[in-house]
Image (tube, rainbow, N blue to C red):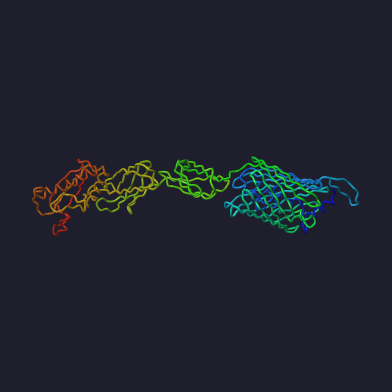
Amino acid sequence: MNLITIPLILTIVGSGNTGTAVLPLMKIGQGPRAAAMGESFTGLADDASAVYWNPAGLGQLTGYQFALSHHQWFFGITDEVFHGAVPLGPGALGFGAVYSSEPDVQYWDEELNDFSSYRAWTGVLTAGYGVRFFDDYRFGLTAKGMYEALVDGAGIGGGIDLGLSGSPVKWLGLGVAARHVGIMSFDEGTDTLPVEIAGGVRLGSRMFNATVDAVYPLFDNDPNFRAGVEFLPVPAIALRAGYRNGPVDLEKLGYLSGLTAGVGVTVAGFGIDYAFVPYGELGMTHRLGIRIAQAGPADAGLIIHVVDADTRVWLKASVAVSGVIDSTATASVVRMPSLKPGKVFARATLEGYEPDTDTFLVRVGRVREDTLFLRRLRSHIKGGIYDAKTKEPIGGALVYRGPMGGRIPVPPDPGTFHISDVAVGEYALDASGPTLEYLPQTCTISVPAGETVERDFYLWRKSDFLVLEGVNFETGKADILPQFFPIIDQAGQILKQTPDIRRVELAGHTDPRDINTAEFPSNWELSDARANAVRTYLIEKWGIAGARLSVKGYADTQPLVPNTSMENMYKNRRTELRILE
């Protein structure tokens, strides 16, 4: 073939306005499958050749793919094409390489002396990445470098492709791509590549695909349309056909030259594809390819880890999952290898820990790993330090011992303490007042997970006596009325928490009205009986040692207030606690 033939071919192949873009090889569709479908592949692009047609299509590949194809043109021109795809992260890396050879190209000098012939060749390397986002939508970007060897020099260039694709519904695919955006540099200057904007639609299922593309070249040729079909009567065989009205000039080559056809056979991941593409008077072209594909996961997958939020140690917890699947498991790692794409709601629970919930979005062909963090239930100890007689806050200090320990000051205003985030377990609490005249108290408490335990301390001055205020009796009786039990309980708590009080006197009192019954011959027996009733209650309910409790009746000899009214006499019918040692 001589150099005069090359522009003649480009004139025939290029439709309408041939323009000024260089490297027409970039306009030749790559791969026998797409060629057989009329080079209508922008909205489908579901194999490794997406690196050429629409890099966004790489985002839907879940397994490894490698393909080699041979394009046999007229005049001995051949193309060798490689495509590859490697899943990585939420998408896939794509690779492409093209070597186009034009043998026996003749050239002449200005005097038309026949010099010789040479082999012109062009090489293109492409690499890119397509990523999936929002479930069924993808974005892709590729970069490419070109080298063209001619008899009187060479050209070097570079460019990028951009693509978007998506499937708003399962049977519909949409795609748009900007291809060959770049420049080529020769000795005499710089020229643009044949940039084109392509939009495509796919309608289909597993057995059938129908595609339509619209291509708008920016610098050469007229806009053109392409359409194709692919039918799989059985999974191993694909029949393909298509039609395109560009970039070939059908007025010059004949309208039958827009037809394309082909077939593909696939067995156990290995496939052979063939495409037949006529170019009218220029001749027939053939494209033959082989491909190897490793099937990726068809379903989505999810792995959920459960760990302690503070220590990051794995925890064996109960994990309940709902959404695209309903299941429950008890484990530190829950594996769900086969799920339908969609949302998964997970909740992990474990005794002693706050539950954790999360929502995971699993996507087709992807195994997602996520973690649920369980935080230990926070327990608390709170309370106050008060004067046992006045019930007013006095503050002081609190020492706590157990799984955790420490000493905290308690201010007199408001006289309360709060120990947060304590470990679960048994604790001994020691409360002391602001001065040594207050007898310290101690107690033991159990702190469960996730609860607040409240304990108040009422400290007794050494010089004070305690009136069980409100604990009164019916006239002539020594029975404790139930409504007064809480008041005596407070006294029992004080005695139990104050081991420094080794002996107290329970003093019983009456009003001045004389009594003379078989049970109580006088007020002296009645006052003794009332003090003994309180003693018995403290021993039985609070476990106070009897040796610590002495009893004495004072009848009406020590009134609190003058017995001048029924109200005052009511106050004088009482029982008091007095510290003896």
Q: Quadrant of residue 497?
A: top left
**Residue 229, how many percent across, how many down?**
68, 51
**Residue 29, how many percent across, how many down?**
72, 50
Q: Is 376 in front, or is 427? A: 376
**Residue 254, how many percent across, how many down?**
78, 55
Residue 162 visible here: no
Q: Can you say which quadrant of the picture contains the C terminus?
A: top left
Please count the marks in the image.
Answer: 0
| 75 lies left or right of 334 | right
Residue pictured at 8% horizontal, 48% vertical = 518
**Residue 484, how many percent across, how many down?**
22, 51
| 195 lies left or right of 402 | right
Residue 83 visible here: yes
Q: Residue furthest front?
A: 233
Q: Is 81 in front, or is 530? A: 81
Q: Is 199 in front, or is 409? A: 199
